Amino acid sequence: MRAGTRFFICMIFLLAVSSFSFASSVSVFMCQKDGGTESLRAATVEIENGVLDTLFDRGYIVSSVAAAKSGSDFDEAASKALQNSAEGFFDFMVQITVRYTDAIPENPSKIVFSDIQSIEWRIVRIKNNACIAEKMQMLEDKYEGETDLRAVKRVASELGSSIVKALRTAR
């Protein structure tokens, strides 16, 4: 085989391989539905960080948009987040809604696992605004001896893994 032919075959092979090795980009949008406080709770921030970390560790390019909290118009905020994700050329937007009990927290910056009722998430494909996956997760009790912070981190990691699984099937 001539050197030019080998070079041409190698270039085609590299081009084919590189086209399959790109990373998808994901924008994360947090919503906090909370009758107890209008400030962003530390648990919401911890869940967002855990999901972002999990997505990044699994090879996704990630970013987050400003969170929406009680007292704001969730539909308008979601529409703005979707627009920002499209303008940022993201492939997907993940909307995560954390629902809290109506108990008024003594300190919103303290993580109290039992205040979280449920977590809902949905994945939207940006190019056609189609919802490709969604799920609602009721939280179980903490494991024995598990701190509130550790429980929230565990839930965030599990949530991130569920989102990664849904993203992989959506490709």
Image (cartoon, rainbow, N blue to C red):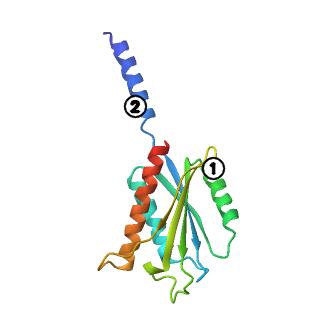
Q: Please, is residue 23 above or below residue 160 in the view?
A: above
Q: Mark 2 belongs to which amino acid?
A: Val
Q: Counting other residues with Cα less than 10 Å from the Cα at mark 1, is it few (<14), some (14-19), or many (20 or more)?
A: some
Q: Position of residue 96 (x, y in %)?
A: 54, 63
Q: Measure the alpha-carbon separation of dots 1 and 2.
A: 27 Å
Number of numbered discs on residues: 2
Q: Position of residue 21 (x, y in %)?
A: 42, 38
Q: Please, is residue 57 above or below residue 33 in the view?
A: above
Q: Counting other residues with Cα less than 10 Å from the Cα at mark 2, is it few (<14), some (14-19), or many (20 or more)?
A: few
Residue position marked by numbered label 1 in the rendering: 86
Residue displayed at 63% across by 48% down:
129
Q: Mark 1 belongs to which amino acid?
A: Ala
Please identify the residue farthest to the bottom as the structure is shown. 106
Q: Position of residue 63 (x, y in %)?
A: 52, 57
Q: Are marks 1 and 2 in contact (CB under 8 Å)?
A: no
Residue position marked by numbered label 2 in the rendering: 17
Q: Please, is residue 109 above or below residue 44 in the view?
A: below
Which quadrant: the N terminus? Answer: top left
Circle 2 SS class: helix
